[in-house]
């Protein structure tokens, strides 16, 4: 029987609980599920122009301006589905679109205005990787 004084006590090996409130804000890493890591690595590096960081068996890592992107196969059946949509901010969406099309990236649409705001127009276009994950280019074009 567990002594009453031990009920609800943290195990001796647990770190001390902090009373500082947690506020999640900065993304450190995003996982993208792919079928073939080597093939996907070539696509993300060569077609999308992402900076390759390193690889381990079954994993590849890229740098997205300080956020790490990890490519891997699904560890379990429930994880084997397309990822969330990632929106890549680009300064010139027309140029980025043309450059990626030259590298045989498959786009869903052409760059178009999503919203006309007071000081800028928000442009987007969507594309897919080799595993049918969808991504977007986005650009905030300042009005003159």
Image: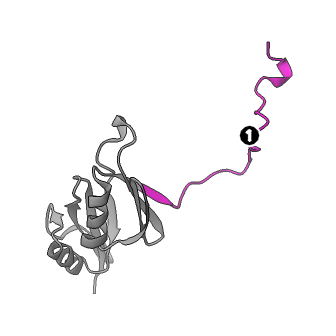
- The quadrant in which residue 101 appears is bottom left
Q: Main secondary structure of the magenta part?
A: loop
Magenta stretch bounds: 1-30
User: Residue 45: percent from the left, percent from the top?
Assistant: 31, 70
Q: Residue furthest top?
A: 1
Say if residue 73 shows up in the picture. yes
State the count of labels. 1
Q: Is residue 87 magenta?
A: no
**Quarter of the image where one finds residue 140:** bottom left
Query: Which residue is rendered at x = 38% and y = 37% of the image?
Result: 76
**Residue 9 among magenta residues:** yes
Question: Quick one: quadrant of the C terminus?
Answer: bottom left
Q: Quadrant of residue 120?
A: bottom left
98 left or right, relative to 31: left
- Indicate left or right for 75 with 128 as reference: right
Which residue position holds label 1?
14
């Amino acid at each position: 029987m567990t002594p009453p004084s031990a009920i609800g006590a943290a195990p001796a090996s647990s770190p001390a609980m902090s009373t500082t409130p947690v506020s999640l804000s900065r993304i450190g890493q995003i996982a993208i599920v792919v079928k073939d890591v080597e093939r996907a690595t070539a696509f993300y590096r060569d077609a999308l122009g992402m900076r390759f960081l390193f690889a381990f068996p079954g994993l590849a890592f890229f740098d997205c301006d300080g956020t790490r992107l990890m490519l891997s196969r699904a560890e379990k059946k429930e994880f084997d589905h397309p990822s969330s949509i990632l929106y890549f901010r680009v300064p010139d969406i027309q140029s980025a679109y043309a450059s990626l099309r030259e590298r045989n990236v498959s786009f869903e649409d052409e760059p178009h205005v999503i919203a006309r705001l007071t000081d800028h127009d928000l442009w987007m276009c969507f594309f897919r990787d080799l595993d049918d994950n969808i991504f977007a280019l986005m650009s905030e074009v300042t009005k003159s």
